[in-house]
Image: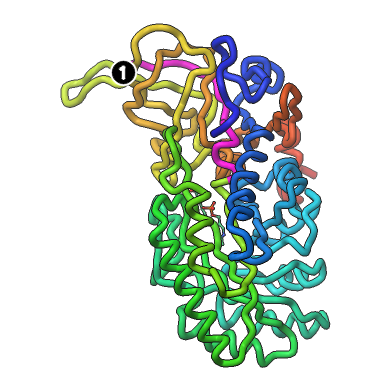
Amino acid sequence: MNHFEPIDGILHAEEVSLIDLAETVGTPVYVYSTATLERHYRVLAEAVAANGKALGDVLIAFAVKANSNVSVLATLARLGCGADTVSEGEIRRALKAGIPASRIVFSGVGKTDGELAYALDVGVRQINVESPSELDRLIVVAERSAACPDIAIRVNPKVGAGGHAKITTGGEGDKFGIPVDEALALYARAASSHHVRPVGLACHIGSQITDLAPLEAAFVLLRQMTMTLREQGLEVSRLDLGGGLGVPYQGGAMTAAPADYVAMAARVLDGLDVDAVFEPGRLLAANAGILLSRVIQITERAADADGSGRRFLVLDAAMNDLIRPAMYDAFHEVVPVTPRSGEAVSYDIVGPVCETGDTFARDRTMPPVQPGDLVAFTGAGAYGAVMSSEYNTRPLVPEVLVRNADWAVVRPRPSYEDILDREATAGWLVKA
Ligand code: LLP
């Protein structure tokens, strides 16, 4: 469910007309709904509460990579949400948004020594160690910082899942996590160090997962590993279950509902006496955001000898603003802000960037639009603005956060001067 609905025939974000917003801020622009973010967090938190003590003292740590806007993070922080981070930059954003370090998890396959030292310095809740060599480096850094961080060992459960090969992370051959036997040995080795304190295991098997079976297989494995480690006299008090639950990009109900997902986790971990961590990204943010764009023109290409004609809907948004269709063949619905009457039309929806890959959809049937009309890409709140760039020197797409009838530009569109001022001309190129 989300809060982008028509009021008097005009698509609104909560109580804000997208027509008014586009006129004031310009397009393209990302628009987020506070009510949707809050609702998604609450649905998950309520599912956790409904399962009593089976999951222990649960931390919901939003995967900052999905949407790292500081106001979005602050909205979730107010509800008690923590953060799953993968870089010093993300930790800094989470802290700036008011998420206490005690609710920040630091994951990632390639944390530098500098980033590890920073995480120790601010005192994050836990560092998820993803390889033996990372553990070696962390021990050295921790000794230098006179710290003894809580760590979890990230396991590669050999169950990959997800909406696209590029976002599957738990399969054999993926770069993430440590194979089971090696992870068990590494846990014991970490326990013998005075500079780190192993507290648990972590896994994350992929993203846009719409079937609970692979997630359950991974959680069962974590349970078995917990028992094995305990038999060796080692303490295991936390299990980080990762993120990955998919969302409906084409409307309709969720194929795997958050309540069923949490109930499944509770069933698997019941009686184990561990505190669970969930790291949802897409689940909280995807349907809390849209990308608002304006139609520049419609280019009709007459049929040639060997093919049919095409009708290109050229938007002012492009792959640099929303790369998911180009990168993962992802589907985003494109809906007119003010639908016109008339028969549905088939368009190739494209942006102005000079690449054929700058295509959002081929042969998409939708209500007819005219140049100047506004359209919204739905489900764009996760992995949208965070993956944007200034390719083709198109100014970084701005972001707006709506709350009831209020809205705020929470990342402004840079001016061309801003863009050019960020660069320096090498001294030898400047005329004396
Ligand atoms: N935890 C870890 C360790 C992760 O690597 C990820 C996502 C998450 C949590 C959150 O997963 P989620 O709940 O959002 O599925 N850019 C891609 C998605 C990449 C996901 C990477 N890892 C996309 O646009 O589909």
Q: Is residue 416 visible?
A: no
Q: Position of residue 306 (x, y in %)?
A: 17, 26
- In the figure, is residue 131 to the left or right of 57? left
Quarter of the picture containing the N terminus is top right
Quarter of the picture containing the C terminus is top right
Q: Which residues are magenta?
A: 284-300
Q: Position of residue 11 (x, y in %)?
A: 57, 18
Please name whichever residue, 23 or 17, is drawn nearer the observer in this view of the structure: 17
The residue shown at (59%, 65%) is 54
- In the figure, is residue 240 to the left or right of 414? left
Please name whichever residue, 251 or 290, is drawn nearer the observer in this view of the structure: 251
Which residue is label 1 attached to? Answer: 301
Residue extending furthest toward the left: 305
Q: Is residue 166 part of the magenta span, yes or no?
A: no
Compared with residue 210, is residue 418 higher up or lower down, i.e. above or below? Answer: above
Q: How is the image coloured?
A: rainbow
Compared with residue 402, is residue 368 higher up or lower down, i.e. above or below? Answer: above
- Disc 1 element: strand
Compared with residue 423, is residue 377 higher up or lower down, i.e. above or below? Answer: above
The residue shown at (50%, 41%) is 323
Q: Position of residue 8 (x, y in %)?
A: 58, 10
Count of numbered labels shown in the rendering: 1
Please name whichever residue, 91 or 254, is drawn nearer the observer in this view of the structure: 254
The majority secondary structure of the magenta stretch comes to strand
Q: Is residue 299 part of the magenta span, yes or no?
A: yes
Please name whichever residue, 113 or 18, is drawn nearer the observer in this view of the structure: 18
Q: Is residue 329 visible?
A: yes
The residue shown at (66%, 22%) is 26
Q: Residues within 10 Å of mark 1 (few under 14, many from 20)?
A: few
